[in-house]
Image (spheres, helix red, strand yellow):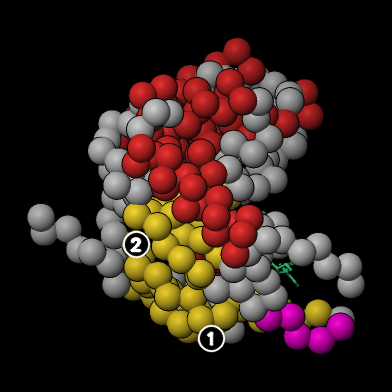
Amino acid sequence: MSEPTKYIEIQGVEQTFKTRKGNFPALRDIHLNVAKGEFITLIGHSGCGKSTLLNLIAGLTTPTAGVLLCADREIAGPGPERAVVFQNHSLLPWLTCFENVYLAVERVFGANENKAQLKARTEAALALVGLTPAAQKRPGEISGGMKQRVGIARALSMEPKVLLMDEPFGALDALTRAKLQDELLEIVARTRSTVVMVTHDVDEAVLLSDRIVMLTNGPAATIGEVLSVELPRPRYRVALADDPAYQSARKAVIDFLYTRQAHVEKVA
Ligand SMILES: Nc1ncnc2c1ncn2[C@@H]1O[C@H](COP(=O)(O)OP(=O)(O)OP(=O)(O)O)[C@@H](O)[C@H]1O
Ligand SMILES: [Mg+2]
């Protein structure tokens, strides 16, 4: 194996937001290396800083301290090699589903491919998430789950080296969610993408991840524990349900979230 073990490097990262009430320290002292092809999930209670960390890796924000690298280069802004699926899908409302995906495809492949090829890529990405029938609809005409799937199609269509996903399946019903998780596993196995995904769902984290990064509660959240999920791939959800290794990984995450980091709702 000649693959580098540090594809994404996060070194001593801190993020403090300036607010009207003064400085708010969201993240502190984040150290994490992600290997090429690794599937990482970030899990933690609401408001602990998962989206903040993902936005830093995406290059959408810059840290107040520390450094982030991708393939040995400092992450200085967004780039086509790091595609993001946002928590709130963020589609352009005046464009159809097809056009929303096509825009991303054109940006990445437009210089080297003709219109028919770009169209074929867009159609393939929409088909992958089961949205062919909705291709000509606008975001206002489809459900929240469908919008989320357009966001996933858009990210996958860019064939990114790194896929950054912020609760991509959060708004979906259980069946669609399971279907897309299975598809994501297949796609990632095929494309060997590196994935960093935020989730609230313990079963989803265990099913998908090589490692689960558990964040402590904010303010000034940091990485509390990293769990390696030692389950062979390909993974099948039905077979896993009775697997002792699956059960013990699940228990470790639940224990972290609900015993050691039991969430205390703060009212400012
Ligand atoms: N631009 C900002 N300005 C000020 N505070 C912010 C900003 N962005 C995030 N925060 C604060 O930083 C903390 C972390 O927010 P973040 O959105 O990363 O949480 P999260 O873990 O993604 O939560 P959720 O699971 O609800 O999506 C929160 O307390 C939030 O209010
Ligand atoms: Mg979030």
| Ligand 1 contact, mark 2 (Cβ < 8 Å) | no
Q: Which residue is identified by label 1?
A: 65
User: Which amino acid type is shown beneath numbered disc 2?
Assistant: Val
Residue depicted at x 61% and y 25%: 174
Q: Nearer the viewer, mark 1 or mark 2?
A: 2
Q: Which residues are magenta?
A: 21-25
Q: Position of residue 225 (x, y in %)?
A: 46, 66
Q: Position of residue 221 (x, y in %)?
A: 61, 73
Can you name the residue that lies furthest to the left here?
1
Q: CA distance from mark 1 to mark 2?
A: 19 Å
Figure quadrant of the N terminus = bottom left
Residue depicted at x 42% and y 47%: 249
Figure quadrant of the C terminus = bottom right
Q: Is residue 113 magenta?
A: no
Q: Is residue 23 magenta?
A: yes
Q: In the rendered view, tell whether residue 27 sits above or below residue 215.
A: below
Q: In the rendered view, tell whether residue 25 sits above or below residue 236.
A: below
Q: Are marks 1 and 2 in contact (CB under 8 Å)?
A: no
User: Which amino acid type is shown beneath numbered disc 1?
Assistant: Ala
